[in-house]
Every structure is written in C-alpha cells, then in structure tokens.
Amino acid sequence: DYNQVEFVCLDLFQCVTCALLGSDHGGRRGFLMAFLEELQRTIVLHPTEVYIFDNSSRELEGIEKYGMVHGYCSDPAEAVAYVEELCDHLHGRSQEKKQDTRLVVVLEDRTLLQNAMKDKETAGLLLQLMKDLQKCGGLLLVSGLENTALSFNAPEFFKQLREHRCGLLFGNLSDCRFYEVNMKQSKEFTRSITKGDAYFFQEGALMRLKTIQSGGKGSYEDGRQ
C-alpha cells in the first residue's frame, strides 16, 4: 500500500467477484499469473478447484497443467456450452453444501464477454454462474473485461459485477471507466503509475498498490523443475 507503506492482504474470496482491468503491459496478466501460482503453491493447505475460460491465444495455457485446474476452455465456439456444464456442476456442489474446497472461475475470454454484451442468453448464463459460485463461496475472477463505462441497458451480469465493486485497475485512475471515481479520490490519486501498480476498489474504499507479479522464468512451475 503506497499510503501506509506496508503489506496488504487481499482476501479476494470475500469479494464473490473480482474484475481485473487495464492492459497486460500495465501488469494485469502478471498479477493474474501470480495469483494462480499462489493458489497452486498452497493447494495442500487450501484445496482449490480452478476453471479457466482462456482467450483463443491460449495465454493462460501454462496454468492448464497445474493440478488445481479441473477445467480449461480456449475455444470461443465451445465457451457457452461449457458455461452451462459448469453451472450444472456448481449447482450440484451447492446442493451438497461442500465447503472444504475453494472454487475459482477465471474469465479471460474476451470474446465470451463481448458476446454477453450483445446476447441475453449468454449474459444470463454468466449471471447464473455468478450466483452459483456465490452459493458455493467461490470466486469469479473476470480478467478479460474491457475498461469501459456501462450503458443504461447493459446486461444484469455486468451491472452486478460493477455493483459488487471489487477490482483492480492496472492503469492511471483518470483512465478508469468501469467504476465510478468520486472527486475526492480523483484529487488524491493524480500521479501516473508504473508497471505492476494498481488501484484496488472495494466497496467505497480505494487504495494504490504495488502488486505481486509472476516471476516469469522463476515462476512456480519453473521453480519445481
């Protein structure tokens, strides 16, 4: 935390949903990779199931081989069907009331999210996915979201994602479009940020952080080798 100059623990599992906004150049994907690597590193202490909707470039492909990954989809043509399948799975989990395993769904597929903006059925499935995860105490990590303002007639899924107001912006605060920023916050955070810096939104609070980034060649997977 830049203001207090101390480490801050972000318990994203208390957020239900978390949006990662901004460019990869600003450190968005580096943080995402670091977060997923940490889940794998601590899986013995905290059993975790991760389901990934990657983009067609398969930029999260390296995560697919982690033992915690129970599902991976990188084909936009199959994404909607896989969302349906995952909703059925999560509904069964919520009925069994299992609380011993953490559930994480990563939406990195920009095509799926863009289609949801136009197609009510797709948006409705994502909303159901959000609700089912909430019942299971899981986390929906929306990392492929565009940093744009929502229109009045935007699908309910995106409106709820904004209203939950838990997210990190890897970019200058003046560039924020998805979340509203009040005048006090605009005046407090005016300096340009560097790669790896992010603004953390949680309800009405806002803080500027230096985030942990993936070590690249020194990442968890390479470290095991």
Image (cartoon, rainbow, N blue to C red):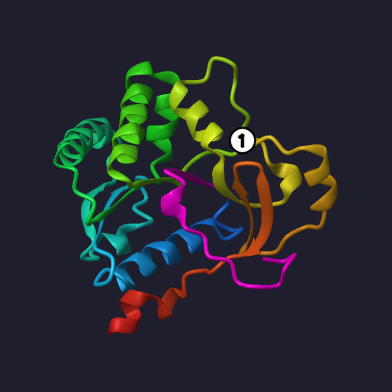
Residue 15 highlighted magenta (yes or no) = yes
The residue to which callout 1 is attached is: 178
Q: The disc labelled 1 sits on which kind of residue?
A: Phe
Q: Residue at 31% across / 26% down in the picture?
A: 125
Which quarter of the picture shows residue 59?
bottom left
Q: Eyeballing the image, is 107 above or below 210?
A: above
**Which type of secondary structure does the marked residue at label 1 adopt?**
loop
Frontmost residue, 14 versus 161 = 14
Q: Residue at 55% across / 34% down in the picture?
A: 162
Q: Eyeballing the image, is 170 above or below 158?
A: below
Span colored in magenta = 1-22
Frontmost residue, 77 versus 53 = 53
Percent across and percent down for residue 76 are 30, 36
How many neighbours does mark 1 have within 10 angstroms: few (below 14), some (14-19), or many (20 or more)?
Answer: many
Residue 128 highlighted magenta (yes or no) = no
- Quarter of the figure with the N terminus: bottom right
Q: Eyeballing the image, is 186 above or below 79?
A: below
Percent across and percent down for residue 146 are 54, 38
Tell me if 91 is positioned left or right of 106 in this view: left
Percent across and percent down for residue 192 are 78, 57
Q: Residue at 45% across / 59% down in the picture?
A: 32
- Quarter of the figure with the C terminus: bottom left
Frontmost residue, 126 versus 102 = 102
Q: Residue furthest top?
A: 153
